[in-house]
Amino acid sequence: MRYKVLVHVKGDDVGVAVEEIAPGERVSFVSLDEVGFEGLIEALDPIPTGHKIALKEISSGANVIEYGRPIGIAISNVEAGGLVHVHNIRSLRWGG
């Protein structure tokens, strides 16, 4: 199976696109840390290579989890399959 999204840790809210993903495209994801953790997600937005896609709904104000740790706070609701980027999360690292 060809995976277009890699998930760092099972339980992460987001995965990283390893190829461009078109809106409406159903893509496979796989975890880098746990054998057998994989699934499908339908992209709602264009997801450029290297950008994040939400694997589940993320509510405004919630922590966004990647690498098994919070990386940011959602500043708006993000639907599963949506692009996760500076327009809908605020980084915890940079405080911006």
Image (cartoon, grey):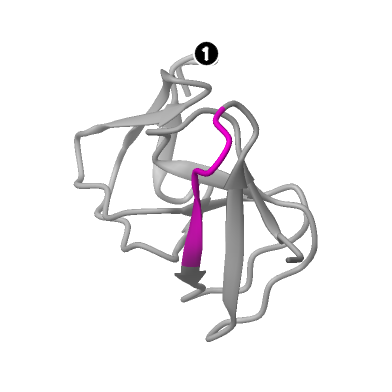
Q: Which residue type carries mark 1?
A: Arg
Residue picked out by circle 1 = 93
Residue lying at the far bottom of the rendered structure: 24
Left or right of residue 46: residue 55: left
Find residue 31 and report its horizontal and vertical position in percent.
58, 39
* Residue under the point 44% across and 64% down: 82
Q: Is residue 88 above or below residue 35?
A: below
Q: Report the label total.
A: 1
Front residue of 49/8: it is 8
**Residue at the location (49% across, 67% down)?**
40
Callout 1 secondary element? loop
Say if 38 sits above or below 61 in the image: below
Can you give x and y, in whole percent of width and height, for residue 41 in the image? 47, 68
| Quarter occupied by the N terminus | bottom right
Vertical side of 96 occupied by 10: above or below: below
Asked if the stretch drawn in magenta spans residue 3, the answer is no
Segment tinted magenta in the rendering:
34-40
